[in-house]
Image (cartoon, helix red, strand yellow):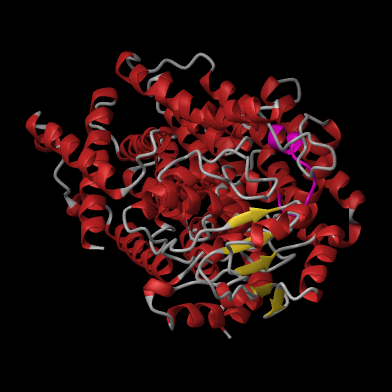
Amino acid sequence: VIGGLLAMGAANAAVTLGAWSLARRMVPGGGLLETLFLRLLLISMSVLAFGAAGLLSPLPLGIAGILALAFLIRCGEHRTLPRLDLRSLPRGPLLLAGALLLRLALQAWFFAPYTTDVLSYHLPKVAEWVRSGSLFAPRGIDDHAALPAGFERVEAWWTVFLHHDVLIEFAGIEFLVLAALAGRSIARSLGLGERDSWIAALVVALVPGLHHQATACMNDGAVAALVGATAAFLMAGRPWPLALAAFALGVGVKPTAAFAAPGLLWLAWRRTGTSTRPALGVLLPALVLGAWDYVRNAIEFGSPLHPAGTPGGALQSSVSLMSLVRNAGLLFRDRLLDDAAPLGPHLDHLAGWGAPALALGWVGLVAALFEDRRWRRPAAAFTLSAATVLACVSGDAWFGRFLLFVPVLLAASAARLASTVPGARPLLILALISAAAGTFLPYDLPRSGVEALASQSWRERTTVPRFGAELPGERPVYLAQNRGPAYLLYRPDFSRGLVYVQDPRELAGALRGADALFTGPLSAEQQQEVERLVRSGVLQPLSEKAYRILP
Amino acid sequence: VTSTEPAFRRRTWTAAAALAVVAWRIALEPRSAWRDVPALLAVLGSVLALDPSASRRRLAVLSGAAYLVGLYVARQSPRILELFR
């Protein structure tokens, strides 16, 4: 652990100083948003490069971090770091931000991955990468496992050094901070002062959908952060390659970022940015990161958008006016008020924007549109992006997750309303209290669930009991048609490997050399094969899903 | 401002469009129009489009925000409290 911590410290210091070094060359005064975005870009690049070379492990990353840090210090980059003058920042928002960051750190420490999608197809990839040190490891059997993994690359960064997932939520928290800084930058671009723009950042950080996504290892919050950062860069007149890099990184996290492109193009239209030359250097790596999984899918499956468009698949692969009409109707009628279901990262039948962004944000936006012409283009652009996203996704219970970039603008209008209309500030405070209370616990990890996690030591903290995934043995086989909490079987320290089996005819062979079997959702044929092996004395049932392999 | 001036015409059309949105939303779901966010925003838009005085504008904006905050908090609070039990 000590060696991992040292490597993690060196590598994080290197990417942060490197990001600052790049940011100050692109933007006068560097900029928090630009530095954090470039840090995430450098992290993603590092994981991709080391993972592609089969060197994704603490020692190579730590050595590279030390060398890069030594180089940057030798170049004197550390002397250019700005002095942090807390007195120059508005005290109220600063205190709230500090409390929020502390709570996020505690949530990251005491939460363990708990959502079904994450356990089924996001994190098994991370576990395999960390175990093998290579990005070319198996992805598991979930048909969504081939979806882009830009967010998982940042999660791998936070797990590879300790060979443990205790800090894995830090990836989502970094993107939540990015979204908040994007909200602050947009507010500044629209004429808000220092204090009000920090309030906008707080409103973004307390958007329930974004907040719960951040601590649940889900990637829609990261997409929203990168779409918001793209808009913020465009509105602030930053170099266009920087904005394009943010967009590319977003597409590399999830295709839903690409669905928001029309509105972003509108924002980019006839914008004059600062010098593009320093920013061109980060564009190529960002394009590689954005395209990586699509190219792999094109080679492996013949379609860059796989599994979208596969027969029987749930993912829509076309633009549809019918989808837009249906989804907009659902959003307006059922989801905006977040009263159809409790709040959580999946946003079942919810928008997840929260009281500050919804109530004060929308009302503030309507007022701003009448009072200040600067708001009209961003409002129209965000509306267009929301409309194109709605036209590209199926009308399931969860499409609200793909619109989480909208509150990044609404946060700015909420802050404007609170500062320009006497009497609105107490309303904003009440709304923020409501949002803060609503982001303590997600519905699928209520107080009892957190207490159960907190009672475990950090080394063994896991949601295994919640999913009935207790399993003896060191060499288990995982059998499923699709889905299931496969990630939990790796253990938090990735000490156990999995053999994935989908074809029931291959099960008996796979069980030789294994010592346990865990089953996810099974097809009829898989179920019959398991029952046959139980009858023939090969498998001994331990629970509904777990079996011991008898010698 | 006279009825032939562009500003008057623009405001009138904006208010009419906003009221049309209100009518459309109420026609769609009459029983839940009281909690229909687009309808509420359209009402606010129609009021602001008529270019009221600063105090009436403030009253309209504050009322709209207070109504939505109250609606959201009242419907969400029981669910949040439930999670802490």
Q: Which of the two residues, A466 or B73, is positioned nearer the viewer here?
A: A466
| Residue A405 x/y as whole percent | 56, 42
Q: Which residues are magenta?
A: A388-398
Tell me if residue A389 is in the magenta stretch. Answer: yes
Q: Which of the two residues, A451 or B72, is positioned nearer the viewer here?
A: A451
From this view, report whether residue B24 is shown above or below residue A161. Answer: above
| Residue A284 x/y as whole percent | 41, 20
Position of the N terminus of chain A, as image quadrant, is: bottom left
From this view, report whether residue A519 is shown above or below residue A60. Answer: below
| Residue A130 x/y as whole percent | 42, 51
From this view, report whether residue A538 is shown above or below residue A526. Answer: below
From this view, report whether residue A121 is shown above or below residue A320. Answer: below
Residue plotted at (55% across, 48% down): A219
Residue plotted at (41% across, 38% down): A51
Residue plotted at (33% across, 39% down): A39
Q: In the image, is A217 to the left or to the right of A493?
A: right
Q: Which of the 4 image quarters holds residue A25? A: top left
Instruction: Look at the image and tell me whether residue A237 can be seen.
Output: no
Q: Which of the two residues, A117 or A162, is positioned nearer the viewer here?
A: A162
